[in-house]
Image (spheres, helix red, strand yellow):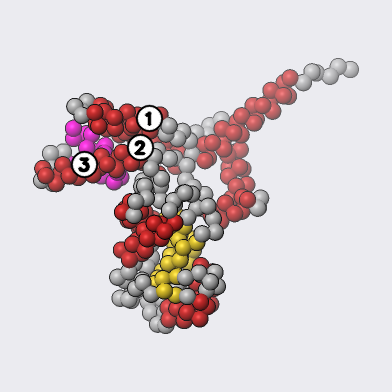
């Protein structure tokens, strides 16, 4: 059982140093923790919609801050709310908010410091927009309300319900907001919990837990690809072509790690499913079947670079076959 718990902990919380036999929790707390973990497993393997929490950009300087607040409020036409619940309506209040945020902004400011962190909170089409706003409001209060000023606005101009949350970087205590990658995942977990409290089915699962190998493209790269001016994509194609034409080239270290990580993820899910399949309850056995179905539909062990190399190999093979199929010319 300890190996299964280790697998479960690794799936839900990432790699940990597991000390077998260590009484980390008393029996009652351990059972409660395990029950909550199994509820999380049920949501993940049922493919509950994943929340999106994305840092969309930053603003530097008074003009940029005001321009961004005018953008998210559609030049004051949309009503925003701040960390205290005060409604901000119209161009004048938007302008006053931007000016208030810039007062004392030189405190702890470096040449490259940002004055805002711009966040988008989103859920798939069909999500109740009013409930999403309530969840976003709860998220803002919980994560930033005690330390930072912010404005929250809901946008209804796309199929994907989403809210813009612009946070003043300089906190009330004088510390500046500087989010890291781990912070984003922690924010996703809090936002997903807020969504569930509002009756929205939501989860915040790391990519590795879902066996996702390919990383999402950054917004700038997506826009460049769409406009067919992406130097990044051209560079990737050149790199892939060099790899497929080099007989000695093998998997690059990042690709090898990604493949090995998914193999570990698959092994962990299989171990949890095997343990549950031996449960005396029908609920445990049903969850085991759900996990196995989840495993069966897990993405391929293939990074973007590996996929591009495979496509190039197929293209080169087709070109060779076409060339070999042409009849030889005779004089």
Name the residue carrying label 1.
293
On the image, the x and y values in percent for residue 215 come to 47, 45
Mark 3 to mark 1 CA distance (whole Å): 21 Å
**Residue linked to disc 3:** 35
Which range of residues does the magenta coloring cover? 1-19
Query: Marks 2 and 1, how far apart in space?
Result: 8 Å
Based on the picture, tell me whether residue 14 belongs to the magenta stretch. Answer: yes
* Tag 2 secondary structure: helix
Q: Residue at x 67, y 26 (%)?
A: 318
Could you say where residue 35 lies in the image, as x and y percent from the top left? 21, 41
Q: Is residue 183 above or below residue 287?
A: below
Q: In the drawing, does residue 173 fall left or right of residue 118?
A: left
Residue 72 among magenta residues: no
Rendered position, 264 above or below 123: above
Provide the secondary structure element on which disc 3 rests.
helix
**Residue 189 in sight:** no
For the residues bearing labels 3 and 1, Cβ distance under 8 angstroms:
no
**Quadrant including the C terminus:** top right
Q: Residue furthest right?
A: 331
Residue lying at 33% horizontally and 32% vertically, measured from the top left: 291
- Disc number placed over residue 147 in the picture, else none: none
Q: Quadrant of the N terminus?
A: top left
> Which residue is label 2 attached to?
45
N-term-proximal mark, 3 vs 1: 3
Query: Quick one: label 1, few (<14), some, or many (20+) residues within 10 Å?
Result: few
Cα–Cα span, label 3 and label 2: 15 Å
Picture quadrant of residue 39: top left
Marks 2 & 1, CB-CB < 8 Å contact: yes
> Which of these two is toward me, 58 or 51?
51
User: Of 230 and 235, which appears nearest the observer?
Assistant: 230
In the rendered image, residue 160, in percent from the top left (x then y), is placed at 50, 53
């Amino acid at each position: 059982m300890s190996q299964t718990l280790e697998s479960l902990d690794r799936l839900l919380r990432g790699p940990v140093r597991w000390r077998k036999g260590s009484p980390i929790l008393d029996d009652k707390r351990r059972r409660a923790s395990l029950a909550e973990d199994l509820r999380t497993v049920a949501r993940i393997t049922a493919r509950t919609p994943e929340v999106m929490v994305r840092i969309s950009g930053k603003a530097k300087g008074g003009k940029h801050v005001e321009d961004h607040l005018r953008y998210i409020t559609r030049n004051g036409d949309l009503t925003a709310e701040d960390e205290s619940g005060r409604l901000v309506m119209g161009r004048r209040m938007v302008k006053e908010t931007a000016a208030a945020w810039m007062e004392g902004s030189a405190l702890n400011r470096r040449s490259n410091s940002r004055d805002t962190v711009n966040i988008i909170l989103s859920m798939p089409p069909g999500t109740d927009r009013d409930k999403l706003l309530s969840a976003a409001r709860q998220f803002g209060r919980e994560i930033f309300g005690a330390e930072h000023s912010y404005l929250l606005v809901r946008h209804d101009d796309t199929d994907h319900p989403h809210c813009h949350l612009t946070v003043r970087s300089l906190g009330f205590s004088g510390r500046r907001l500087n989010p890291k990658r781990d912070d984003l995942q922690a924010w996703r977990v809090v936002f997903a919990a807020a969504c569930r409290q509002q009756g929205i089915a939501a989860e915040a699962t790391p990519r590795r837990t879902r066996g996702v190998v390919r990383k999402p493209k950054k917004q700038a790269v997506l826009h460049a690809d769409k406009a067919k001016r992406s130097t990044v994509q051209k560079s990737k194609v050149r790199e892939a072509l060099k790899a497929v034409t080099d007989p000695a080239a093998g998997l690059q270290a990042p690709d090898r790690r990604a493949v090995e990580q998914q193999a570990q993820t698959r092994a962990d899910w299989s171990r949890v499913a095997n343990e549950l399949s031996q449960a005396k309850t029908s609920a445990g056995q049903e969850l085991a079947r759900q996990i196995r179905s989840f495993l069966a539909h897990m993405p391929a062990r293939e990074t973007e670079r590996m996929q591009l190399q495979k496509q190039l190999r197929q293209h080169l093979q087709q070109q060779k076959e076409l060339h070999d199929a042409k009849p030889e010319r005779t004089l």
